[in-house]
Amino acid sequence: MLTANLAAKLEGLLGTTRVIAAEDSLLSFAVDGVAPAAIIQPASAEEVAEVARFAASEKLAIVSCGSRSKLDLGMPPARYDIALDMTGLCRIAHYDAGDLTLSVDAGMPLRHLEQALAEQQQFLPLAVPCFETSTVGGAVASGIDSALRQQYGSARDFLIGAEFVDGTGRICKSGGLVVKNVTGYDLHKLLIGSLGTLCVITRLNFRTFPLARFSGGQLVSFASVEGALAFRRGLEAKGLPLSNLEVLNPGIAAILAAILRSAKSGVPQGLERGRWCVYASYEGNAAVVERISRELEQVAHHTDATNFESLDKSTDESLGGMLREAFEWLRFASPAVLLLRIALPEFSAEMSAGLSGILKANSLRGAMLLRARGVLYFLAQHDTEGGAALDRLATTARDVMRLVAEKQGHTTLLHAPLALKSRASLGAGVGEDTGLMRRVKQAFDPQGLFAPGRFWGGL
Amino acid sequence: MLYEYDGSVEKGRPDVVVFPQTSQEVSRIVKLAAEHQVPIVGRGAGTGLSGGALARDGGVMIVFARMNRILEIDLENQRAVVQPGVVNLDITRAVDKAGLYFAPDPSSQKSCTIGGNVAENAGGPHTLAYGVTVNHIAALQLVLPNGEIVCVGSKHGDASGYDLCGLFVGSEGTLALVTEITVKLARKPETVKTLLSIFDAVDDASLTVAEITARGITPAACEMVDGWTLRAIEDYVRAGFPRDSAAVLLLEVEGLREAVETQADAIVEVCRTHCAREVRVAKDDRERELLWKGRKNAFGALGRVAPSNYVLDGVIPRSKLPQALQHIQEIGKKYGFAIGNIFHAGDGNLHPIVLYDPRDAKAFKNAIAASQEIIRYCVDLGGALTGEHGVGMEKNELMTLMFAEADFDLMKRVHDVFNPDSSLNPGKIFPRSKGCGEIRVKAKDTMGSNR
């Protein structure tokens, strides 16, 4: 149980300046309405380990945080005593540009890291939402998709090692600092998308990538979903190396156009017309960019595209940036939002009709964004937060999950009103291996210190 | 007796060898073995190089040779579902006409099985650009040591929850037996260009690799063969490697032709900067295949030079390649061995080859000592014990060079989640000579700085 003098005890561990117990600060670290009793700002992995050992001895629960931009991912914590503010761990520990390898503290902001790597003409393909504020550790722990996954995959494909504090309060590591390594179990892969429920990530090792000198982007519009999907298939058949490939339904296009307009950015014509759109971006040397651009146009000509737009650099950057932030603006699109991430063997016109049908049957508005291969963001929205709206969103979630399961896909809840999130039926998201995952959680965190209940399935 | 050996220098004799044909049969065998409390070891083609598929403590060996069917090919979504005994190259052969292939290409790809590739997280020359086995596996069906059949991962998209599939790939058969694998298929590149760069000094070749990496040039493969090894290859395969050179680099660039041309030009420029005597471009597929035949048959070629050889597998940061190769030669001199080098230079994955006579006990002992010194040196440079062969029973006692007590404790707890009685593949990965609590060797820091 939480002791009354928690803050005083924590101050005994780390000193008075790095323990915060002021009410307004505590509220700013709340997760789904649950606030901690104290905030701690560790400056090293050793201090994190010390706090974990203290928490274990006092049976306290810890939620580790970076910029706190995605703490509403996952379920509300069952217990939450200490917020670990990891932003004090923010150094680049090792960067060998000649080897394209990097070791960086978990609290390092992605934007700062981007600048440091750009000086060496390199980058890390973690193009995640809330990019301006996100930390490296938070981006990995959230498991949120990178907009560049079409070409670079997910963190799983370039995370090469990690250091973290386990539930026994010890500093552990996995992997290493070389690009190829099969020594020991790849425990660091388990941390991706773990929502901080296994351990506290203190440092992450990555391979880095060279920045391309040239890039391009195109937006192609279609009157129907069939046209957009035929175009997308045509691109895949060509095997063109695209860094970003997204299919936007008219709902997404409308939201995007409104955001770009309000930001006084250029709005591509295709978005204005309420059509299905396909956005593709690509990079390479000048000849490669020119070639891909040309081929995209040719594929578009062989389909029933209504508009083909080669984007200028500024429009491409703002549209690409907005799509990277899709999770952010989708979850705040209305007062009551249900946002699901759906993995499907194939997104078809039939599936699109099925999902639209569910929205219509529940009198809800919605939108769909298909990213890279097989990842669909599904939005259902309502203008009020009342009980009737929640019921409709709940029915929608259940119907979508059922439809997706029939097609051998699976659904993960990304965002929902808190009252809806707590309904047991939405805690799903893990399959028959939930039991194994529970035991893996116990292996990392035997006493349940880390964000208990936050993970899918209540882990 | 056949099943006592794999491709390593280790030995281990099973008490019984079984050949199941279905996952259910594997499950029943595992349950029976559990009842009788005997160890179980899974095995594919036995081409492994770290003793991973040897029955170190005897028991039941489950050989997957008869679970060798390709169950499903989904060309549209670039996936195939295969049994573990399918030979690596057979996956590519099955989808070749559709312009697809399975990217991981270990040298033994004509005989090694996909189940073994999954267990070891196998690599190969082209993993430089396309990643190792784990990057090409979408889902697994597994039999746990209690006989339970479970599925992890997702055929499409990322699975919800912890990445158990990522954990099982490379776990060296110590957590579960893999009975069905969903692989990702890659699209064949439109253009491939293969270059052979010839050097009069090994240092020049190493510096070339370091600069290619540092300049962000990304060849699909970048292999180095030293002069001593390439002469053995020429005697055997006649691949066209110049006998009087000190080292050659076999480089391959793939992708859109516009990118391939630019990258090939940049590579030639770097090679010339570092005094390459000549850079040849393979004129056609026949010449390309011959060069690769030389590379992939190197170990067979070396078998003609000495009664036995010990192929090592260590990894170093690529920026440290020149000093590492020099130091390996010094270690060879110290122990009186010729040490050849043929390896995946582009990702820093060294394969020094120590030639020795196994009938000479002292030579064998020295070969092991030299090998361990080389591997220790790799770790000291900030590298790793193994890049693709696995820890197995070859390097389990060296694990303390990289991992500390807390790391082992956690790995052991994760191990026990799946394999609590250590009935599955015992004696692998974890050090045996000391209990975890007794490990005193201070592990090298591999997390960026010394604490």
Image (tube, coloured by chain):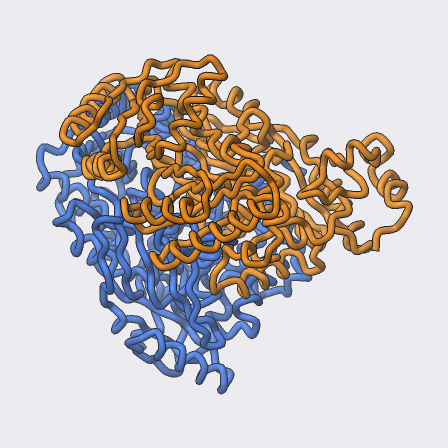
Chain colours: A orange, B blue
Residue B231's image quarter? top left
Residue A452's image quarter? bottom right
Q: Would residue B225 appear left or right of A418 to someone viewing this image?
A: left
Quadrant into which the C terminus of chain A falls? bottom right
Residue at the spot 65% in from the left edge and 49% down from the top edge: A76
Which percent across, then down, holds residue B84?
Answer: 31, 65
Residue at the spot 64% in from the left edge and 29% down from the top edge: A90
Counting the numbered discs, the total is 0
Quadrant into which the N terminus of chain A falls? bottom right
Q: Nearer the viewer, residue B18 or A304?
A: A304
Which percent across, then down, holds residue B423?
Answer: 50, 75
Residue at the spot 50% in from the left edge and 61% down from the top edge: B429
Q: Nearer the viewer, residue B267 or A453?
A: A453
Q: Is residue A301 visible?
A: yes
Q: Is residue B189 visible?
A: no
Q: Would residue B395 appear left or right of A44 to someone viewing this image?
A: left
Which percent across, then down, holds residue A174?
Answer: 55, 48
Which percent across, then down, holds residue B250?
Answer: 24, 36
Residue at the spot 37% in from the left edge and 82% down from the top edge: B16
Q: Would residue A162 appear left or right of B205 to someone viewing this image?
A: right
Measured along the vertical axis of the image, is residue A329 above or below residue A339? Answer: above
Q: Nearer the viewer, residue B290 or A265?
A: A265
Q: Nearer the viewer, residue B88 or B247?
A: B88
Residue B433's image quarter? bottom right
